[in-house]
Image: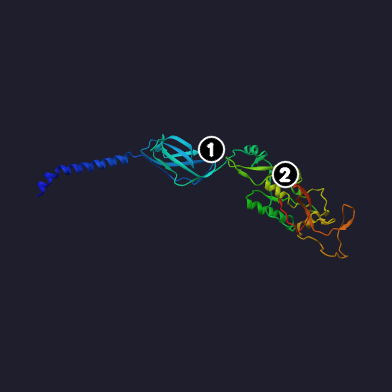
Amino acid sequence: MDKETFFQEYKSVLVGAVVLVVLGIALLLNFLLSTKQISIKAGEASFKAGEAYAIQWSAKNVERVGIVLFNGDKAQWIATNLPGAAGKYVWNSDPYQAAGAEYRLGVFAYPWKKGNPIAYSPAPITIVGQKYVSCDDYSVEQGWPFLPGNYPNTRKVFITASTYSGNLGGLSGADADCAKEAQKNGYVGNYIAFLGTDSKSATERITKDGIFVEAEPIGALAEGKTCNRMVAENIQKLIDKTRLAKSLAQVELSDTFYKRLGDVWFGRRTVTTETKCLPILKQGVVGAFSGGYNCQDWAIGKRQIYTGTVPAEADLMRCYDSEGKSVQANYYGAVAGNFDENGSYVIGGDTCDANHHLMCIEQ
């Protein structure tokens, strides 16, 4: 069969095939051009409730879109009926937005119906919660005053996590320990130890009085401030806190502050505090006395001056016990906070080889 005869016989077949190919291409192009497509771009991996969060997407053949926040099988509307071509929406999140680490965003063709395209954020999003808008909110819930970190005339106070013997290197060494721990915890300000010596009481060292709040902040507020638990209205009220019964201390102080306050070196706290013949109560020995109240101005970390027979030439201070008996002061000791059998605060003497926390006050 020659070419001419072949084309004449199969002309209609060839024409039909060409038509089918053209139609197929046209249908494919029409499908591709009319298919609705949405993709969402990766955003920040985390943000804080109350902050603005940018949501970006690309939409093809989609006139309007909606945005949903998913947390497991729970969905929360973010926005509806947005122009698909806009490609971006800034979500001003609610300060009370629940925190979570497994959130995902979904952008879909709006209004929603089965079969509509939807795109999900490619990775989980973490939302850091900010439950409280003001310290007043927190105070109401806790039943105790909380003040914002920038409240006028506040002085922050904390009790060290570390404990120390009575050999602190003097007051300057104790102040350095407070400064070191304040820096470690990110507490801004100048902190000194609430400690007294024979020449200057702990109260006299506090030259800047004010409202005392715990240095450890409680959470972050929507406006970026922090809340601090109120401890006392002034320095005298702060000293009064060291004498509270357990039932009151557990209400008025945070758990950590309450526990550490029962284990703190104080030394001579006020100008009326004695400087000599400190009873060493924790030894369980009647008539055990320290010559001073401050571990020799915080330079001694020992227990007894003599552990055996006291030599005749020892010039030790004479003290009088509760029965009026004269005894020798034979210990190195200082005033410290302790708990009694009921868990209430008591102030008493302890030997200088013991270890206690330091109370540090902003000045």
Front of the two marks 2 and 1: 2
Q: Number of labelled discs? A: 2
User: How far separated are the C-alphas under marks 2 and 1?
Assistant: 36 Å
Residue 62 percent location from the top left of the image? 37, 37
Tell whether 150 sits left or right of 206: left
In the image, is residue 89 above or below residue 276? above
Q: Is residue 58 visible?
A: yes
Please name the residue that numbered disc 1 is placed on: 94
Q: Quadrant of the rendered structure where residue 83 is?
A: top left
Residue 224 percent location from the top left of the image? 58, 42
CB of mark 2 within 8 Å of CB of mark 1?
no
Residue 50 percent location from the top left of the image? 54, 39
Q: Is residue 127 visible?
A: no
At mark 1, the secondary structure is: loop
Which is more N-terminal, label 1 or label 2? 1
Residue at image point 22% right, 42% down: 20
Residue 26 percent location from the top left of the image? 26, 40
At mark 2, the secondary structure is: helix
Crowd class of label 2 (few under 14; some 14 to 19; many from 20; radius 10 Å): many
- Is 220 or 262 nearer to us in this picture? 262
Residue 249, which numbered label?
2
- Is 223 or 135 nearer to us in this picture? 135
Tell whether 300 sits left or right of 35: right
Badge 2 amino acid? Ala
Residue at image point 11% right, 49% down: 3
Residue 271, which numbered label?
none
Residue at image point 28% right, 42% down: 28
In the image, is residue 355 above or below residue 35? below
- Is 141 or 343 nearer to us in this picture? 343
Crowd class of label 1 (few under 14; some 14 to 19; many from 20; radius 10 Å): some
Residue at image point 60% right, 44% down: 219
Badge 1 amino acid? Asp
